[in-house]
Image (cartoon, coloured by chain):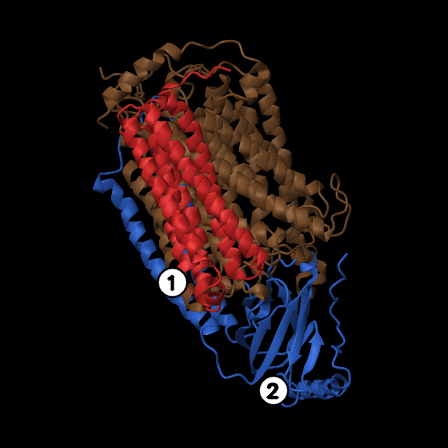
Chain colours: A red, B brown, C blue
Amino acid sequence: MSFAKPLATLRTSAGLPTGRLALWWLLASEVIIFGGLLASYVMQRLGHPEWAYEAEHTNIWFGAGNTIILLTSSLSAVLAHQAAQTGDGKKAARYLWLTIGGAAWFIVNKAIEWTGEISHGFTITKSGFWSFYYTAAGLHGLHVIAGATAMAIVALDAAKNKELQRVEYVGIYWHLVDVIWIFLFPLLYIAK
Amino acid sequence: MTTTTASHHADAHAAGHAHDDHEQSFFVKYLWSTDHKVIGFQYMITGLLMAMIGGYMAYGFRMQLAWPGEWIPGVGFLSSQQYNAYVTTHGTVMIFWFAMPVLIAAFGNWLIPLMIGCDDMAFPRINRLSYQVFLISAVVLIGSFFVDGGAFGGAWTAYPPLSAKATMNLSPLGSTMWVLAVALEFVAFLLGGINFITTAMNARAPGMKMMDIPIVVWMIVVASILFMVSVGPLVAGAAMLVLDQQLGTAFYDPSGGGDPILWQHLFWFFGHPEVYVVLLPAMGVCAEIITCNARKKFFGYKTLLYTVFATGIISFFVWAHHQFVAGIDPRMANVFTITTLIISIPIAEMIFLYIATLAGGQIRLNVPMLWALSFVAEFLLGGVTGIFLGASGSDIYFHDTYFVIAHFHYTFVPIAVIACFAGFTHWIPKMTGKMMNETLGKLHFWTTIVGFNLVFLPLFITGMWGDHRRIYNYDHFPDLSTQALQDLRIASTVGLLIMIAAQGFFVWNLIWTWKKGPAAGNNPWQGTTLEWSTTSPPGHGNFHPMPTVYRGPYEYSVPGAEADFLPQSQPPA
Amino acid sequence: MISYAVEQVSTYAKDIDFLILLICGLVGFWFFVAEGVLFFLIFKYRAKEGGKAAYMDGTDPKHTRFISWPHRFILICDVVIVVFAVKVWMGVKQTMPAPDQTVRVVAQQWSWSFQHPGPDNKLDTADDIKTLDELHVVVGQTVQFELVSPDVIHSFSVPVFRLKQDVIPGRAIKGWFKTTQTGSYDIQCAEICGIGHGAMVARIVIEQPERYAEWVAANVATATVPPAPAAPAPAPAAPAPK
């Protein structure tokens, strides 16, 4: 089926490209979903001081390593955006694949970390802390996978110099995934 | 806005695509379409079908209440577990699968592109995806009736631990399917909402300034924003509830360190703004109809927008009035009583503006106008009875009684049923090109209104006399099994039967319109907004050529003008 | 209005009924004024042959005063309602008078059980009287109750007291009432709690001190031998889950 672009997709009455406008609204809804989850966690945590002992069993090195990986991948997303702005689709695609590599590394780390924790008995049902730990980090992990998938699609197009504006959009989305982790890391790993 | 030149450029660019209206198969044309009008019809038809399911549930449990334990024609004997499932599904369906798809999605899809002078939504394929996700969510919900253990029966509020533990609600699969269906519906409306917001912000016709946007478009956009901002925590909460149900975590289970009240906060933080999510589009629909049929400008367009924004913001600070007696800190109740009564200020202002719009008009009492005026009249009763529940002291008694049920049905029936029919009868000539029958329409209107009031007026009294909610059989309660109360319950059920039978007129009218409805012409109601300047039904691409906007949306009865309306797209003389 | 069908049996029932009546008067006034104006305008400005509607946008102060003045009066009504509502609320939920007696109410799927303090008037001692679906109190005494639930959320609702309080598993929620007359009334569960919710009823028996003492004497003997709930239940008991 052919899909002719309707005029509606091209107008910019508000002065912003429609894609970017929609993206900001998407980010707003994501922030509120995580905001609700983390607010619930913080409220529960304040009522359960004993969770601090549970939190001691998290592996801060894995958490810190993953933080660095995500921050670095955000840098390559910025570089991809810069390349896209100069019209160099191939270079943008290369940087995007680098970012996706970071995402993959993050997920692999996470898998190793979780396998270790689960084998030591720290499962999702062990206590309220671990329930929140797996739920929040798991939901974030799903966003990492979704972001990486979106970047792969955009990178394939960008390599052919098509839809270069989307490089910026996935980049912004990737920064959100990054920022959410910046909140998760201290709340789940450092607070003890 | 300052970007009209950019828009003109875009218009020229798209002109080449305007006429590629080729032959399409039925599947592509009606089920896989990205056309906003078709998707609007999909939402409208699905919503009305789901309303029939919700109405069937209401029939089942009201018959049980009027004649407890008797065989119900078309339902059979209703067990107490089925009764709970019917009550739960009725509430869930009517809000999430009837009010929202019809008021936000169907009217949003039909009206936003037509009213802002555009050919489609800003993201046509996301729009299609949104409907598909919505359809799947409906299937999941209905499917829950056919799984082992039956549908979920823990009320539409789904308070844990009842909803979280299969050993307590006895529907291990039904309860999870309920949560999943609701979560999918949220996803559908998040996708749809982003689409509505960006379309209204970005795809307006050249010349259409912010203050030239018709009220209903504003309302749907504000409702979408409210939905988006309020639903997030509940999405996270739903994920936690599913984990509690299926993996045995203890987010809401006090025996494992969780807190059942947490769900109530997450639920009502969404649940109260949700009232305004459906109220605002309904008020928007009525604003269009009232201005058009009173032949008058809306009284205080900007004031109305301010009250809408104020309502939207305050609605985030009132949620705990649903939880006064739920075990929260009693001091919190005082704060929430104040915020709740504050919200009555902008809502009262809104109603006053609607009434003031009538002053000095030339009121045509056609079918859409009757529906729109009855919306104002009936919603008033729903609004004022809310004060009894928002005031903490009286809520101690009224909480979870039938008074609450009567109150919110006096808000939700005007919203979902009355405004739905108002908008339907007003815009169906535009969407199909055929006029509906006035006589049948008036019969439908009066019988529905009589039935509706007969259902819910008695429930105010049963509520005051102590009937509380979700009770399968009042014969178990010595103080509640009096003849006077039972007579009121029977009156209410008779009202429901009238209301259901009244819909026969509507179906008859639809068939009549389909078979021999006269042609509507472009502008049967002499309206000013852009949708009336194109053909009925609008062709592919809606407008040929694309319109330019020269004035505000409600220029009726302008002094010195020849006709009593000046369309937005008519160039100044 | 309410007392026509539901008696006032607690000290604060009158306050709550008065508050409801007050709200009824205030919002009833505005309801009828608004409906009256609405129908008057519909009648007065119905379409006439050759008529033309007025052209006004609702910004002229001559017109807006018809809205802004009622608005100010509504604000005053709101303040009045808030003051009275908060006063009643604080009296019922935020004060805890010194109790003459303390009882524990256990709400579970789908019945009520009550733990009376017994002759020593202390809870959790050997002479406590445990009953099923029947609560006995002395008329005129201030009773403090403690609500607990082992399973799901229930709600302790006594319409004749105008009292309602949810029972949350994992918490012990306290409250109070003071009865004003003898009699036997419904205790209902007002929060959906599963398939037996529609039959979760108990009775509260409010007695003169002598009758209550007799009841205690009769039950403490049987209760101490087997500590099972031994009270005869005249009210229909909750049916077994199907």
Residue at the disc numbered 1:
B335
Tell me, yes or no, if residue C135 can be seen here.
yes
Give the quarter of the figure containing the C terminus of chain B.
top left
Q: Position of residue B424 (x, y in %)?
A: 50, 28
Residue at the disc numbered 2:
C122
Residue at image x 30%, y 13%? B12
Label 1 SS: helix
- Mark 1–mark 2 Cα distance, whole angstroms, equals 36 Å
Front residue of C46/C18: it is C18
User: Which disc, if any, is residue B359?
Assistant: none
Front residue of B241/C81: it is B241
Q: Is residue A158 above or below residue C145?
A: above
The quarter holding residue B446 reads: top right
Q: Position of residue B480 (x, y in %)?
A: 66, 61
| Amino acid on which the number 2 mark rests in the picture | Lys
Residue at image x 23%, y 20%? B5
Residue at image x 61%, y 27%? B507
